[in-house]
Image (cartoon, helix red, strand yellow):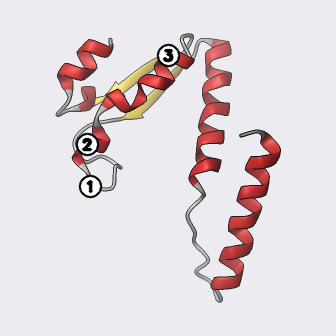
Amino acid sequence: MNSDDAKAAFRKALEERNRRCSGRNKAFLIPETVQDYVMHHILSAANERGLFIQFHTGLLEGNRRTLSNSNPELLENLFLKYPGVKFDLFHTGYAYTGVTAALA
């Protein structure tokens, strides 16, 4: 996805939210494609600068209460794509500490 595609997807989500919501509560979920674009943009900039990126991994942390979502192996594609980034996985991906050790 490029910048124009991400902008279009975000604009479409905003328009849909405005059609469905009235009043003050206009919260909405940012489309996954836009989230992916932003993440890759940030990681690309970090990769160029050799920066650290922290991921809060571990048991049921921000993963919709699905244990398998805390598996740091799900981040492997990012580790490979951005070798200049220093990744810090909080809590060593507990309960997947063995996977974290293998990835390291």
Residue at point 73%, 48% (across, down): 6
User: Is residue 102 rendered to the left or right of residue 51?
Assistant: left
Label annotation for residue 80: 3
Give the mark, 3 or 1, whose residue is nearer the N terminus: 1
Q: Secondary structure at mark 1?
A: loop
Closer to the chain start, of discs 3 and 2, is 2
- Specify the quadrant of the image occupied by residue 104: top left
Distance between the alpha carbons at the discs numbered 2 and 1? 9 Å
The numbered mark at residue 87 is: none
Foreground tag (3 vs 1): 3
Q: Which mark is residue 65?
A: 1
Spot the residue most to the right.
Answer: 4
Q: Give the SS element for disc 3.
A: helix
Measured from the top left, where is residue 87 in percent x and y? 44, 20
Q: Amino acid at mark 3?
A: Leu
Badge 2: few (under 14), some or many (20 or more) residues near its Cα, within 10 Å? some
Mark 3 neighbour density, 10 Å: few (under 14) some (14–19) many (20 or more):
few
Q: Is residue 56 above or below residue 64?
A: above
Q: Can you tell which mark lies on residue 68?
A: 2
Q: Is residue 64 above or below residue 74?
A: below
Q: Amino acid at mark 2?
A: Ser
Q: Amino acid at mark 1?
A: Arg
